[in-house]
Amino acid sequence: MYNTVGNKMIKEAHELEVTSQVFNRDGQLHLGQHVLAEFFECDPNILNNIDKVEKYMVDAALECGATIVQKCFHMFNPHGVSGVVIISESHLAIHTWPELGYAAVDLFTCGDKCDPKVAYEFLKKKFNSSNAMFTELKRGMLDEQSHEVAQKAFQVAQEIAG
């Protein structure tokens, strides 16, 4: 069934074809992996340098096999950087607190082309973080029979410290 929007005919949402790749790891189907990373004891000179933070985030995306679509970074006054690298597979986002040697990073990927944990390891090294940890979430859990998104919260896949 189609509806008219302006002068265009569009397909009803419930009839749209599912084109997203699905993970089937550990017998569970899900749409994406979301790594929430905490980087402690980082080099404050790196975390307060917009050019380096942007370069390392872009390089992390490439390192994990992602396809970059766009990027946007902002330098705060008196210090700190926020930014996002939009990738075909989702996004990588960061906010830094150089005065505390801390960075919070979200690494969200969909499909099976790239691994956000590769980006995590890359950034840990580039930020000279002597202490880091992450939680990996499975997002968009799918019902195994219908392959529809189950109406339940994400699932914690693993938590790594150190």
Image (cartoon, helix red, strand yellow):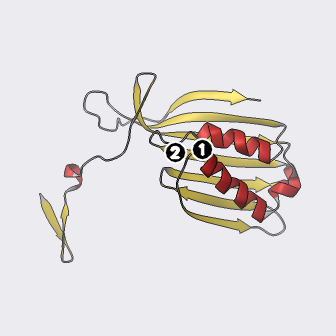
Q: Position of residue 60 (x, y in %)?
A: 66, 49
Indicate the secondary structure of the residue bearing disc 2. strand
> Mark 2 to mark 1: distance in Å?
10 Å
Q: Position of residue 98 (x, y in %)?
A: 84, 55
Q: Is residue 5 left or right of residue 89?
A: left
Q: Judge the density around disc 2: few (<14), some (14-19), many (≥20) Cα neighbours within 10 Å.
A: many
Residue type pointed to by label 1: Cys
Indicate the secondary structure of the residue bearing disc 1. loop
Residue type pointed to by label 2: Thr
Location of the N terminus by quadrant is bottom left
| Residue that protrudes farthest toward the bottom in the picture | 7
Viewer-closest of 161 and 126: 126
Residue behind mark 1: 64
Residue behind mark 2: 109
Circles 2 and 1: CB distance less than 8 Å? yes
Q: Judge the density around disc 1: few (<14), some (14-19), many (≥20) Cα neighbours within 10 Å.
A: some
| Residue 33: mark | none
Viewer-closest of 69 and 43: 69
Q: Nearer the viewer, mark 2 or mark 1?
A: 1
Q: How many marks?
A: 2
Residue pictured at 24% horizontal, 54% vertical? 13
Location of the C terminus by quadrant is top right
